[in-house]
Image (tube, helix red, strand yellow):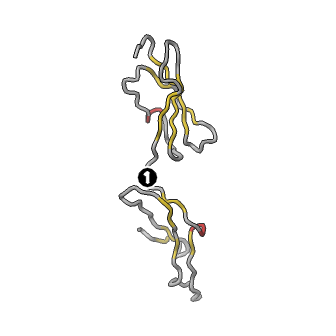
Amino acid sequence: SNLHTTDDGITWTFTLTAPASGTSGPGILGIQLSNVTDLAGNTGVTRYLNQSPYVLDFGPPTATITLADTALTAGETTTVTFTFSESVTGFDASDVVLTDANGTLGALTLTPDTDNKIWTATFTPTANVNA
């Protein structure tokens, strides 16, 4: 939708809207130019983005949370790993909710070379908690 030009027809822009179902999959984005002519009367040819299918991603990322150690003893900590199904941006401590966790979560650290998919933090249990 919203096909428009701001430079006398040289560059065209449009809005691609995700379907309501939230699905994703391969797609091809092309422009049919056989009915388009330039000022000299030359007819265009069909062009495709990168000349090959690309993936349309309309689904949200998912995350898996794992603990390195699930049975801590006094004075121990454990690494918490957040693994996302796709690259994410904007993930920070305010996105993590500790409910009845009896402890605190340290700073989040992005794991290098994971394309913004894997983050870790240290969980420290509250002193004298036996749960």
Compared with 70, 41 (above or below) is below
- Across and down, in percent, residue 11 comes to 54, 71
- Locate the N terminus and report the quarter of the image it occupies: bottom left
From the viewer's perspective, tell me whether residue 76 is left or right of residue 101.
Answer: right
x 47%, y 40%: residue:
63
- Taking depth in this image into account, of 93 and 40 the one nearest to the observer is 93
- Across and down, in percent, residue 71 comes to 48, 20
Compared with 21, 32 (above or below) is below
Q: Which amino acid, by three-letter code, is at mark 1? A: Gly
Compared with 129, 116 (above or below) is below
Dot 1 crowding, Cα within 10 Å, few <14, some 14–19, many 20+: few
- Taking depth in this image into account, of 129 and 93 the one nearest to the observer is 129
x 54%, y 62%: residue:
54
Please, what secondary structure does the residue beneath circle 1 have? loop
What is the residue that sits farthest to the bottom in this orientation?
Answer: 41
Compared with 101, 13 (above or below) is below
From the viewer's perspective, tell me whether residue 102 is left or right of residue 12.
Answer: left
- Taking depth in this image into account, of 51 and 107 the one nearest to the observer is 51
x 54%, y 35%: residue:
119
